[in-house]
Amino acid sequence: MRLLNVSGSPHVHSGESVKRIMWDVNIALIPLLLTAILFFGFEALFVCLVSVASCLLFQWLIEKFLLKTKTTITDGSAIVTGLLLAFNLPSNLPLWIVIIGALVAIGIGKMSFGGLGKNPFNPALVGRVFLLISFPVQMTTWPRPLGICNIFSNGAVDATTGATPLAAFKEAVKNGTANFDMPNLMDAFLGHIGGSMGEVSAIAIIIGGIYMLCRRVISWHIPVSFIGTALVFSAILWCINPSHYMDPITTILTGGLMLGAVFMATDMVTSPMSKWGKVVFGIGCGLLTIIIRNWGSYPEGVSFAILLMNACVPLINKGFKPKRFAK
Amino acid sequence: MRTFRLGGVHPEENKISTNAKIEVFPLPKQAVVFLNQHLGAPATPVVAKGDAVKTGQLIAKAEAFVCANIHSPVTGTVNKIDTMKDIFGFNKTAIVIDVAETEEWVETVDTTPDIKRDITLSQKEIVDKIKEMGIVGLGGATFPTHIKYMIPEGKKAEYLLINAAECEPYLTSDHRVILDHTEEVLIGISVLRKALGVPKAYIGIENNKPEPIARLQEMAKQFEGIEVVPLKVKYPQGAEKQLIYSITRRSVPSGKLPIDVGCVVNNIGTAFSVYEAVQKNKPLIETIMTLTGKSLGQQQQHNFVVRIGTPFSDLANYIGGLPEDTCKIISGGTMMGKAIVNIDGPIVKGTSSMLLISEKEAYRYEEQDCIRCGKCVKACPMGLEPYLFSSLINNGKFQEAADNHLMDCMECGCCLFSCPAHKPLTDEIRLAKTKLRQMQQKK
């Protein structure tokens, strides 16, 4: 006798899976990886590989020996964390620091809460901020990017180091040097400026973002409200005093704001559910970023802004419910 | 293109059986006719064991307010009135009739194939006739139709909406009934329009049925006050509240009925049975249903008109047994249909399909932790938060789930359909609804 399956409806599924979403994010990160290699040489690739490998290893170790559950490293989420962490680091960071960052990101940022889906904070940012506070010198020594034509001819990247545009600006404002030489906007757009490996090239981030939008991994609400708020707020400040505040275009093209708005703030685990909640979250990120940049002690504020807003997500979810039918 | 605003998904349409004309399915050897084939109280039998019955004869009478008459779908003798198992395995009282060799209809039924166009009955007579003939809504809820036409005091009907959306994957019975019985359907709609006393009836139909739309639009010119409204292909376009919104831009508030916004909605299949009841005096003793499945060949896809009481297994035998890989049989569509437990159970009023699902399609992936992606929120056509229900329900907080409007859920399945973590969201919501109803009863 043949037995039939019985289950509740619906009896079909869209085919979406956690794995697919995570691998889509990984695919969206490929342009960033390429620009990182292009501007910072193969050293950048090495940092990425170490970061990803240690994230995978730590997740596997924690699941196997601490939680004693089935391993989930194949779902691709640890690779996303590893890549995003690496993209938030300078390319010349000593590898042992990268490994510590991965341990904090995976161990404290993600697994201590119970794994994927349960973490309130973006794991990569937890790792990054931990390193920023613990190793301030190494974390703020940036290699100058290579010219596009001489990456292969000149392998020695760490020959010169320099500050990021944001840090240089802050320094200039502090010293009262009004005429600060801002980076060429085209360089900033392509990524030919100092900074973390993944944050420099706006164009690569936009390509990745468009891919994720098309695959419906993210929605436009957070990036648009985040960048829009930062743009408007910094424009207001710049109009008040152009010599004291950075111009709005440079503001959004530097200091990881694009990377944060497209890849970090949109992390589905740590962002709100409803459309309006997402907009509020994005506005909060934008405001906090500009406030920390201009009046805080750190030159950049994206990581802190996103982590602070992550903490507000449960509240936002309560306050900004989706619009109900006939309401 | 008109559509509803919130949520919705687009499952694979799989309308494989659209080209199969409606065929008359052979009579069963024994018909099992349940006393409760509709929403509401069971009907009371008016025949006893050993009685001879004719096709179309009243065998159980509606006595409660929300109830429908039941007529004999076959000619024969009453074998017993006993508890029988329905297709979902529930015990229900049924009249079991042994089918006689020759079929004999009740004299009042007009069994000629002629189309009767003149609507001679008055408004009240139509509603009485619908009630007498035991017509129920064939869109799935099987709500007795005549009640919709008894407008409560203080309410006013302004629109008659005919639901031909057929947004469920696989189902093609509405599609076929439009093509094979275009004029009858439109006469049925005119009858309903007269019964309601409204100037206009709108037929809402999903845009993936160009042929029926063209046919209806062409034929509707000969009728007064019928407009065909093509709708965007989006599930659940045929859900009552969504359909009303798509066509009239009116929203039925939570806990209210369509009549509260001046609408009455009927399925197009119901319109056809109303035609038969009012114009031809034929009670609701058969249903038009689809027999389909991906593993069946093109020749084995069918749309049947089947007598009520015919066991599902007769349909399986008709196509030479179930295909090897059949893993699940569904009565209804893949989104809201129910998986059947007992293939020997009979067809009832409102049965719309027998759907054979293969192992590959029926596979349910392992549940993972929620990644809070919000896809369920985006998919929900009622604007609810299924992820929140899931966590509240798993923590036993049923009342809090109800405070977040759990009861507004119509179990359309969009959340589970789109959940990347494969959480059984719709199942959990169903569980909580039952639990909440029990809690309500205890109070």
Image: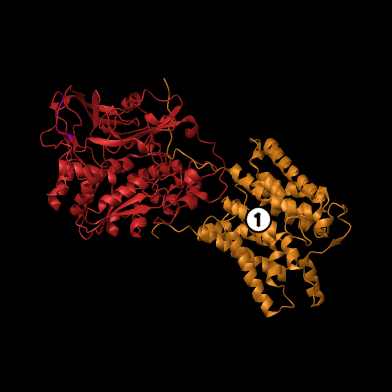
Chain colours: A orange, B red
Residue that badge 1 annotates: A207
Foreground of the two, B371 or A29: A29
Task: Tell me the subunit letter for badge 1.
Answer: A
Amino acid carrying label 1: it is Ile
Which residue shows up at 12% across the image and 52% down it? Answer: B122
Is A37 positioned to the left or the right of A219 in the image?
right
Is A260 positioned to the left or the right of A42 in the image?
left
Q: Residue lying farthest top? A: A1
Please identify the quarter of the rendering in which residue B335 is found: top left
Is A79 positioned to the left or the right of A117 in the image?
right
Q: Residues within 10 Å of mark 1 (few under 14, many from 20)?
A: some
Q: Is residue A251 above or below residue B426?
A: below
Q: Is residue A297 above or below residue B268?
A: below
> In the image, is residue B46 part of the stretch drawn in magenta?
yes
x%, y% of residue A85?
72, 51
Residue interval drawn in magenta: B44-49
Q: Residue lying farthest left? A: B107
> In the image, is residue B433 part of the stretch drawn in magenta?
no
